[in-house]
Image (cartoon, grey):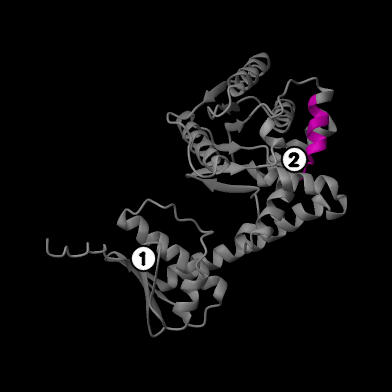
Amino acid sequence: MTEEGRRFAADFARLASDITNPLFAVSGGPDSMAMLTLAHEALPPGFTVASIDHRLRPEAVEESAMVAAHCATLGIPHATLAPSEPITGASIQAQARTTRYALLTDHARAIGAGTLVTGHHADDQAETFLMRAARGSGLAGLAGVRARTEIHGVTVIRPLLDWRRAELRAIVRRAEVPFFDDPSNHDDRHDRTRFRRLLGENEWLGTPNLARAAAALAETDTDVRAMVEWIWSERAKVGGGEVKLAVEKLPREILRRLARRAIGTVRTEAGIVAPEWTEAANIEKLLDSLMAGKRTTQAGIIASVRGDVWRFREAPPRRAPASGPA
């Protein structure tokens, strides 16, 4: 086994020593094809591969077929997944990501895969860190891409977060592995492309250092999440279509996370499905109001204060204005 193969095996084992039958997401780009090459060298048989045709570019059919053909030469099971409905929305990239993970996690469950493996690397992490910093993200956002997380009930791991894009491209070129370059990666209409160019033209920014900063923040965020989980179990009362939170002597970051969870809980119980509610939603005005003892409304939820208890419940539907005389 090569030194790179041993390195990948160690990185994979660190994240997935308890997991069998992994499913690798391979797009056909140099990063994911390098991951496939490393996995074939370093891991025992038993893993499978899936590619996504988002049906946004005609070239995607050829790219998925290339991955399928290469997997056939390696003796690795492969599936091409595609959405049943066209991807639409204000942000095509964001909608494509949502669709991609839905397809991959559904397929992982269907084939009994123990985890989903993606090819995110250190350069991706640095780009994400800068993008979110520019948007004013807090701790959870700056933590970036997680090495191990859960999406739609499926464990997702990223064993390449300590690898550079140039290293991965060198692997596929040296092994003469086929790959495609996605033209959208060079499209300046996308934020990520602009930040990728910023990093490439300014080496002093230090891509590995930014990636390490994101990893450190991810570790801190994991600890904060554990604290929030414990406080929620001790202080939250859920029932009757509402959430009550005892908030005495809690810092703002903990209150922020508890409030988001309370809103999400009430919305879920009320069957409110749109617009999508996420843990990254901005609730600063809501927090300001509640901490000042004022009632407020956000995302279809009324939040009010009584003593040291915050109460969250669904806002009643608005009444139609009475019609005047004919």
Residue 190 against residue 319 in the figure, above or below: above
Name the quarter where the C terminus is drawn. bottom left
Q: Quadrant of residue 34?
A: top right
List x then y, in percent, for residue 287: 49, 74
> Of callouts 1 and 2, which one flags the residue occurring earlier in the amino acid sequence?
2
Relative horizontal placement of residue 93, taking residue 142 as reference (left or right): left
Q: What stretch is highlighted in magenta?
A: 161-172
Foreground mark, 1 or 2, reads 1
Q: Mark 1 belongs to which amino acid?
A: Ile
For mark 2, what is the residue? 10
Give the residue drawn at x 50%, y 27%: 82
* Residue count near mark 1 (Cα–Cα under 10 Å), binned few <14, some 14–19, many ≥20: many
Residue 309 against residue 326 in the figure, above or below: below
Residue 318 against residue 166 in the figure, above or below: below
Give the residue drawn at x 59%, y 33%: 22
User: Is residue 289 visible to the viewer in this orientation of the structure?
Assistant: yes
For mark 1, what is the residue? 301
Q: Quick one: SS at disc 1? A: strand
List x then y, in percent, for residue 239: 30, 66
Q: Quick one: SS at disc 2? A: helix
In magenta stretch: residue 165: yes
